[in-house]
Image (spheres, helix red, strand yellow):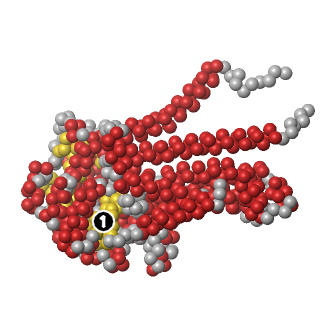
């Protein structure tokens, strides 16, 4: 019997598919990316650098990186805990928890931001209490971190749940039966098993954190040099007819995205290699 | 992944928070509309210098800019702005209703608490191919008018009221004839911009329409961005006087103990130096001498105010921009 190969479609069909896919990529990804740099450099390198040297732009870049970094430990802690609970235990309400983890994907970020305003704003539930104790959440950095966390927390958990479910709990059980304590088991067995998946999730969350606009826009207060993140800075510059500066800032975001993309590719490659090594270690399966 | 990493990020976060909280001098926050950045970028250092010379106190002024309705909502939700400097009375009225700003804020400073004014003008393509000279040319067939959304945006509302006021002032003008006139004008609008900037992009970059109605001060920003050679500014026979009210946010200055400084900050806008900076940013100063000095950049134009013609913003708003107001009536017919 001849094996029907997947790629024995006529040549024109293959070419057509390739053209459509590449054309789509060029139009929707390549073209905007080029435009960003073209517009940013339209009035020369000096204008570009001047746009970035502005203290407000610098503070926006630092704030964006800082907020993304601040979100990481929370994302790791929550993601690992949730994935652990879901993959290794059975309990009532498990499917509810899985659904809830996806909530930030379903809710519009602007709505999420408004939610925080309703909770922490001065007309909100906790507003009067916070004002009394002089704690600033909303229109300050904690609010921005909170909003960022809200939109990014599914990434790590989503990445780890299938991974941990596939790995099962055999290795952990073996470790415990050999006398490992809970922490030993976690650090020596679980973490090495999930580290690439975890890193992958963190990278995705990080990319989202740096680019987040809607939720942060609602809670930021747009204070120049203080609570203005890079995406917000881009918008405001554009509205102020400073398009070179706006696109210069946007190009920084684009560069951060490209760095993320490279990091993601490296991690994917490592993950694949590790899986291959694992499979290679196993004795070949008998086939009939 | 080691345990120290989260710790390091926590430290970074703490540093960020401290950096945001640690300010030695008096810090004022000015919540403003989105194209006011250039003005306050020039004005703030001038005020700081004047205040320090007078009192020895160093003041830092932070700026927050955004769509004006969004800005006042943020102030109502707890953005601790000492002062608001807006481009429309409705937005400050909103804060007055919430008790954050004095009910009689327009009386707290001269000139209706508006340190400068502007007006609505036309921007047409180079050479004015459609020969647009006045509001009546905007309703002619074959003329496409670009305006921001009249119901939801400041620019759009001013445009709407300016056209309405023009029609009202024509011989035999009445609310009925004005409504007809505005209705015709809006029929010439192929679309409504989501804001002033969006309408400008539509006109200048997408090259849609024959005339863009916008603030006189914005025409200068457009020239800076797109070059001067590409368009002409046309002054109609009569237009609306746009006011830019400023106010202290009473609750915030009382809490922060910054009333004196915040008041001085706004008051200085009426000083010779303040008015000069205002004129340099293409906004019409209130001071007659400064205005005279810059007369070349501010052609004389007959204007009417919202108060004179419409009995104040809240009345104008109720008549035209609420659900079921004159705009909705016109637009549902269209």
Q: Which residue is mark 1?
A: B61
Expressed as whole percent of the image width and height from the top left, the position of residue A19 reads: 56, 26
Question: Front-most of B297 and A135?
Answer: A135
Q: Is residue B321 visible?
A: no
Q: Secondary structure at mark 1?
A: strand
Q: Residue at x 86, y 36 (%)?
A: A284
**Rendered view: A238 above or below B228:** below
Q: Is residue A89 visible?
A: yes
Q: Residues within 10 Å of mark 1 (few under 14, many from 20)?
A: some
Left or right of residue A123, residue B303 in this image = left
Quarter of the image for the N terminus of chain A: give it: top right
Q: Residue at x 9, y 61 (%)?
A: B288
Q: Quadrant of residue B129?
A: top left
Expressed as whole percent of the image width and height from the top left, the position of residue B70 reads: 38, 61
Quarter of the image for the C terminus of chain A: give it: top right
Task: Output the chain of dot 1.
Answer: B
**Rendered view: B219 above or below A90:** above
Q: Quadrant of residue A14?
A: top right
Question: Front-most of B188 and B78?
Answer: B78
Q: Residue at x 30, y 76 (%)?
A: B258
Q: Residue at x 17, y 45 (%)?
A: B234
């Amino acid at each position: 019997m001849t094996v029907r190969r997947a790629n024995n479609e006529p040549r024109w069909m293959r070419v057509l598919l390739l053209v459509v896919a590449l054309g789509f990529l060029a139009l929707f990804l390549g073209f905007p990316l080029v435009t960003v740099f073209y517009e940013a450099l339209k009035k020369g390198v000096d204008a570009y650098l001047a746009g970035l040297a502005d203290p407000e732009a610098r503070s926006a870049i630092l704030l964006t990186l800082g907020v993304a970094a601040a979100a990481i430990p929370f994302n790791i802690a929550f993601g690992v805990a949730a994935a652990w609970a879901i993959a290794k235990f059975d309990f009532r309400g498990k499917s509810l928890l899985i659904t809830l983890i996806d909530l930030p994907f379903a809710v519009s970020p602007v709505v999420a931001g408004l939610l925080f305003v309703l909770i922490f704003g001065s007309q909100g539930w906790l507003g009067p209490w916070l004002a009394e104790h002089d704690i600033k959440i909303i229109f300050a950095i904690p609010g921005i971190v909170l909003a960022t966390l809200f939109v990014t927390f599914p990434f790590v958990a989503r990445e780890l749940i299938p991974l941990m479910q596939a790995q099962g709990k055999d290795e952990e059980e073996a470790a415990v039966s050999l006398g490992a304590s809970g922490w030993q088991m976690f650090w020596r067995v679980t973490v090495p098993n999930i580290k690439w998946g975890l890193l992958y999730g963190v990278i995705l969350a990080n990319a989202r954190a740096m680019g987040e606009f809607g939720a942060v826009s609602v809670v930021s207060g747009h204070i120049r040099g203080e609570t203005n993140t890079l995406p917000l800075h881009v918008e405001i510059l554009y509205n102020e007819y400073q398009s070179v500066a706006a696109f210069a800032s946007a190009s920084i975001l684009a560069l951060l995205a490209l760095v993320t993309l490279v990091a993601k590719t490296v991690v994917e490659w490592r993950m694949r290699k590790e899986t291959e090594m694992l499979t290679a270690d196993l004795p070949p399966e008998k086939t009939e | 992944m080691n345990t120290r990493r989260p710790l390091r990020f926590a430290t970074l976060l703490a540093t960020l928070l401290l950096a945001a909280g640690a300010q030695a001098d008096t810090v004022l926050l000015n919540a403003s509309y989105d194209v006011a950045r250039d003005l306050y970028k020039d004005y703030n250092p001038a005020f700081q210098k004047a205040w320090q010379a007078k009192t020895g106190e160093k003041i830092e002024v932070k700026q927050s800019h955004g769509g004006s309705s969004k800005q006042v909502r943020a102030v109502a939700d707890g953005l601790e702005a000492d002062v608001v400097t807006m481009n429309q009375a409705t937005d400050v009225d909103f804060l007055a209703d919430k008790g954050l700003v004095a009910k009689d804020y327009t009386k707290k400073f001269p000139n209706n608490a508006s340190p400068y004014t502007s007006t609505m003008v036309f921007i047409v393509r180079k050479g004015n191919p459609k020969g647009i000279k006045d509001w009546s040319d905007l309703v002619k067939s074959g003329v496409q008018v670009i305006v921001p959304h009249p119901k939801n945006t400041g620019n759009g509302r001013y445009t709407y009221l300016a056209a309405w006021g023009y029609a009202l002032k024509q011989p035999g003008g009445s609310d009925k004839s004005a409504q007809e006139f505005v209705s015709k004008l809006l029929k010439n609008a192929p679309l409504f911009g989501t804001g002033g900037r969006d309408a400008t992009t539509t006109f200048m970059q997408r090259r849609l329409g024959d005339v863009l109605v916008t603030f006189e001060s914005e025409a200068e920003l457009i020239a800076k961005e797109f070059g001067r050679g590409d368009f002409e500014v046309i002054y109609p026979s009569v237009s609306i006087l746009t006011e830019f009210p400023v106010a202290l946010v009473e609750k915030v200055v009382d809490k922060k103990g910054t009333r004196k400084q915040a008041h001085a900050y706004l008051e200085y806008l009426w000083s010779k130096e303040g008015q000069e900076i205002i004129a340099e940013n293409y906004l019409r100063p209130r001071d007659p001498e400064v205005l005279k000095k810059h007369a070349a950049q501010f052609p004389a134009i007959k204007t009417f105010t919202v108060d004179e013609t419409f009995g104040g913003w809240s009345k104008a708003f109720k008549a035209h921009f609420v659900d079921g107001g004159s705009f909705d009536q016109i637009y549902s017919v269209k």
